[in-house]
C-alpha cells in the first residue's frame, strides 16, 4: 500500500475519503497483524531496551502500549499514528477531514460513542466507516456496531480529534446530558418551578404571622422543636465519638488475593476551575507530586468556556501530557456538578476522582485509593479522603474552621460509618468506581451540595462508601463574608437534598432502613433547624445570667431546667469532640481556640438565613468561594522544608 504524506503524519485529507473502499481499510486476522512495538522499532522510533522496559510495565498495568510509550515520552504522537496505520493497514481521520454524518452519531448515541471511543463517520455504499481511537478494542464492539449499521470498516482517529468532532457536531446534546443525567425523581431540577418558591415563601410568612399573633406560644413550640433537634444531633455526635473508642473493626472483609495479581487501572481526576487563573501554576505543581504512574494518570482540568482568564492561564501553562483542558460549553446553569458531568464523558479511567483547584493531595494518595478499591467488596462505590487546611494559622476563623473540619472528618464521619449510617460526601478527594457512578446518573447538576446528595443516593441504591485516612490540604475561608457565602451554599444544599430525598419518605425508609432514615433526618433537617432557631437557644444565657425570660410563663420549671442543661451539655459535647479531633501534633495548637467556637458558629446563623432567601429566589445559584489569597503559603513552606 502506498503511503502518502498525509498517511505518514496520521492525517487524512479529502482524497482519502474519495478513495476506493478497499484502499481505506484492510481487515486482517489478529494473528497476522504485526506488533505495534515491532513496527515502532523498525521505524527507529523506540530503542529495543526502552521497548522491553515498556512491555514489562504494560504487563502490570491496564494500559495500551502506545499510550504507555507516549506517557513515557518514548514516541511522539505522529510516530504512533504512523505505526498504528501500518499495523492496521488503514488510514487516520482527524477533525479537519470532512465532518462525520450526525445522523450516524445519533443512531449510536453520543454518550455511547464516547464510551466505545468510536465515531461512525460516513457510509460508503452498504458499508459504514467507523473511526476509532482504540483499535485494540474495536473487535469487541463490532457486533454492536454491525447490529446498528450493517457491515463496518475501521479507520483510526486520535482521541483528541474524536472529542473535537463530537463537540462540534453534538454539543447541545452533551450539554443537555450533563444537566439532566440524574433521573428526574432523584434530582432537584424540578424545584426551579416558581410554585416551589411561592410555597416555601408562603410557609415562612405563615410562621411569621403566627409569631405576631401568639408570640409566646410560637416561641415555646419552636424552642421545643429546636431543643429536640439539638438533643438528637448532640446524641448522634456523642455516639459517633464513643463508637470510635471501641476496638476497631474492619470496614469490610479484605480480599485475600495478593495485590500483585491486579493490573493497575487508569485513574481520571476531574479538577473543576472557575475564575481561578492565579491557581494554575501551583495546581500543576501540586498534582505533579502525585506518584501514580503517569501512563495511568488522566487529569482533566475542567473550565467554563466563557472563563477567559482561567483558559488563558491554562493556554500559557506547559501542561504535561497526562493533563488536558476540558472547556464546558456555556449555559444558563453554571455549577460544579454540571461541569463534572460534562468532563466525565471524556475521562479515560475506570476510577474517577475529584479535586478542587486549590487542593494539595498527599503524593501517594492514589496508590492507597486504588488498593482500597481492590481490597473492597463489590458494592464499594466511593472512597472519601480526609480534608484539612494549610492556612489554619491565618486568623481565628481559619483556626475554628480547622477545628470543625478535624471534628467532621476525623470523628463524626468515621463514627457515622461505624454506626452504619449513610455518609454524606465531601466535595473533594472523592474517588468513584466509574461504572457505578454512571449507573446512578453521576452528579445532580442543579444541587449546590452535589457531594452530600450523591452520598445519600449511593446509600439508597445499596452502595458503600469507605473513609480513607489520606489527607488533602486546601484553603480555608478566612474572612467572615467569604465564610458566610460558602456556608450558605452548603446549608442551602442541605435543604435541597433533604427536600429531594423526602419527596417519597416511605420509599426512602424502605431503601435505607429505619436506622439510616433516622440518621438522614438528624443530619440534614436537624442541622438546618439548629441554625435557623439558634437565637432561641442563645436566649438561655439570659436565664443563666439571672435575667428574665418569657418561657417560664407557659412552661414548667423542670422543662426549662432541662432545656438549659441540654444547651450546656451540647456545648460540652462539641468541646470534647474538638479536643479529641485535634490530638495530632499538627493540630494540637488549635486546642487553645476551642472556646472561640462560641463566636464562630453564630456566623452560620447569618448563613442559614441567606440560604433560605436563596432557596426561594435562586435555588440553583452557585455562590463561588474565592481562593488564592493564602494558596501559595503551602508551597513556600514545603520549599523551606
Image (tube, rainbow, N blue to C red):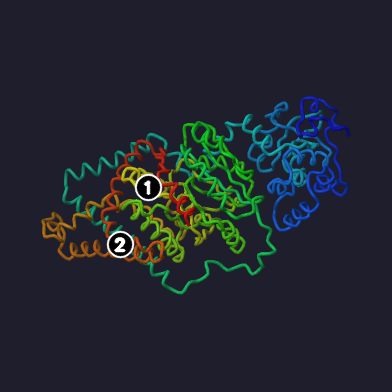
Identify the residue position indicated by label 2 in the image: 592
Q: Is residue 346 above or below residue 419?
A: above
Check if mark 2's residue and mark 1's residue have beta carbons within 8 Å. Answer: no
Nearer to us in this view, 27 or 328 = 328
Which residue shows up at 24% across the image and 61% down it? 567
- Residue 303 position, x and y percent, is 52, 37
Let me know if residue 526 appears in the view: no
Q: Is residue 477 above or below residue 561?
A: above
Mark number, residue 20: none
- Residue 491 position, x and y percent, is 36, 47
For residue 316, side relative to residue 13 (left or right): left
Res. 108 image quadrant: top right
* Residue found at the far front of this picture: 640
Let me know if residue 450 appears in the view: yes
- Residue 224 position, x and y percent, is 24, 57
Res. 408 image quadrant: bottom left
Q: Residues within 10 Å of mark 1 (few under 14, many from 20)?
A: many
Nearer to us in this view, 270 or 153 = 270
For residue 638, side relative to residue 146 (left or right): left
Identify the residue position indicated by label 1 in the image: 477
Label 2: which secondary element: helix
- Residue 141 position, x and y percent, is 74, 44
Q: Residues within 10 Å of mark 2 (few under 14, many from 20)?
A: few
Q: Look at discs 2 and 1 and give the one toward the viewer.
A: 2
For residue 229, side relative to residue 144 (left or right): left
Label 1: which secondary element: loop
First of labels 2, 1 by sequence position? 1
The quadrant the N terminus occupies is: top right
Spatial CA distance of label 2 from label 1 is 20 Å
Nearer to us in this view, 51 or 501 = 51
Amino acid at each position: 500500500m502506498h503511503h502518502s504524506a498525509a498517511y505518514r503524519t496520521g492525517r487524512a485529507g479529502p482524497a482519502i475519503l474519495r478513495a476506493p473502499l478497499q484502499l481505506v481499510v484492510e481487515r486482517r486476522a489478529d494473528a497476522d497483524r504485526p506488533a505495534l512495538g515491532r513496527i515502532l522499532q523498525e521505524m527507529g522510533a523506540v530503542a529495543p531496551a526502552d521497548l522491553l522496559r515498556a512491555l514489562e510495565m504494560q504487563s502490570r498495568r491496564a494500559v495500551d502500549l502506545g499510550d504507555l510509550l507516549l506517557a513515557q515520552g518514548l514516541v511522539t504522537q505522529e510516530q504512533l499514528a504512523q505505526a498504528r496505520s501500518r499495523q492496521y493497514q488503514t488510514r487516520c481521520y482527524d477533525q479537519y477531514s470532512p465532518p462525520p454524518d450526525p445522523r450516524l452519531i445519533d443512531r449510536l448515541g453520543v454518550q455511547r460513542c464516547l464510551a466505545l471511543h468510536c465515531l461512525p463517520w460516513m457510509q460508503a455504499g452498504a458499508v459504514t466507516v467507523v473511526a476509532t481511537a482504540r483499535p485494540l478494542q474495536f473487535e469487541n464492539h463490532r457486533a454492536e456496531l454491525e447490529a446498528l449499521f450493517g457491515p463496518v470498516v475501521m479507520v483510526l482517529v486520535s482521541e483528541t480529534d474524536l472529542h473535537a468532532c463530537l463537540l462540534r457536531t453534538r454539543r447541545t446534546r452533551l450539554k443537555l446530558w450533563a444537566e439532566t443525567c440524574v433521573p428526574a425523581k432523584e434530582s432537584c431540577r424540578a424545584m426551579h418551578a416558581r410554585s416551589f418558591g411561592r410555597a416555601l415563601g408562603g410557609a415562612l410568612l405563615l410562621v411569621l404571622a403566627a409569631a405576631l399573633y401568639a408570640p409566646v406560644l410560637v416561641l415555646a413550640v419552636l424552642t421545643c422543636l429546636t431543643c429536640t433537634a439539638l438533643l438528637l444531633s448532640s446524641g448522634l455526635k456523642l455516639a459517633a465519638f464513643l463508637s470510635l473508642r471501641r476496638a476497631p473493626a474492619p470496614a469490610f472483609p479484605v480480599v485475600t488475593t495478593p495485590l500483585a495479581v491486579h493490573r493497575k487501572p487508569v485513574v481520571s481526576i476531574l479538577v473543576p476551575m472557575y475564575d481561578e487563573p492565579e491557581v494554575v501554576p501551583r495546581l500543576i505543581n501540586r498534582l505533579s507530586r502525585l506518584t501514580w504512574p503517569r501512563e495511568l494518570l488522566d487529569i482533566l482540568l475542567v473550565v467554563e468556556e466563557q472563563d477567559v482568564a482561567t483558559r488563558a492561564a491554562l493556554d500559557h501553562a506547559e501542561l504535561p501530557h497526562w493533563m488536558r483542558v476540558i472547556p464546558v460549553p456555556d449555559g444558563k446553569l453554571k455549577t460544579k456538578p454540571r461541569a463534572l458531568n460534562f468532563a466525565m464523558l471524556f475521562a479515560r479511567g475506570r476510577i474517577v476522582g475529584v479535586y478542587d483547584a486549590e487542593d494539595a493531595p498527599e503524593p501517594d494518595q492514589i496508590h492507597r485509593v486504588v488498593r482500597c478499591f481492590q481490597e473492597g467488596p463489590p458494592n464499594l462505590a466511593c472512597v472519601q479522603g480526609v480534608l484539612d487546611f494549610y492556612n489554619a494559622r491565618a486568623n481565628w476563623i481559619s483556626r475554628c474552621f480547622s477545628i470543625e473540619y478535624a471534628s467532621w472528618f476525623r470523628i463524626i464521619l468515621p463514627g457515622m460509618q461505624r454506626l452504619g449510617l449513610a455518609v454524606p460526601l465531601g466535595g473533594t478527594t472523592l474517588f468513584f468506581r466509574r461504572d457505578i457512578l454512571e449507573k446512578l446518573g453521576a452528579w445532580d447538576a442543579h444541587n449546590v451540595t452535589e457531594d452530600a446528595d450523591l452520598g445519600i443516593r449511593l446509600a439508597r441504591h445499596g452502595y458503600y462508601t469507605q473513609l480513607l485516612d489520606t489527607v488533602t490540604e486546601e484553603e480555608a475561608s478566612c474572612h467572615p463574608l467569604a465564610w458566610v457565602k460558602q456556608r450558605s451554599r452548603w446549608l442551602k444544599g442541605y435543604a435541597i437534598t433533604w427536600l429531594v430525598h423526602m419527596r417519597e419518605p416511605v420509599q426512602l425508609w424502605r431503601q435505607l432502613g429505619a436506622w439510616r432514615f433516622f440518621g438522614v433526618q438528624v443530619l440534614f433537617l436537624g442541622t438546618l433547624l439548629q441554625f435557623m432557631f439558634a437565637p432561641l437557644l442563645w436566649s438561655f444565657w439570659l436565664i443563666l445570667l439571672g435575667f428574665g425570660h418569657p418561657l417560664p410563663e407557659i412552661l414548667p420549671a423542670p422543662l426549662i431546667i432541662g432545656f438549659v442543661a441540654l444547651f450546656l451539655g451540647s456545648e460540652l459535647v462539641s468541646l470534647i469532640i474538638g479536643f479529641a479531633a485535634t490530638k495530632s501534633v499538627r493540630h494540637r495548637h488549635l486546642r487553645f481556640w476551642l472556646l472561640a467556637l462560641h463566636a464562630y458558629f453564630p456566623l452560620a446563623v447569618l448563613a442559614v438565613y441567606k440560604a433560605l432567601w436563596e432557596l426561594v429566589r435562586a435555588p440553583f445559584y452557585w455562590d463561588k468561594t474565592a481562593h488564592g489569597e493564602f494558596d501559595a503559603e503551602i508551597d513556600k513552606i514545603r520549599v523551606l522544608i
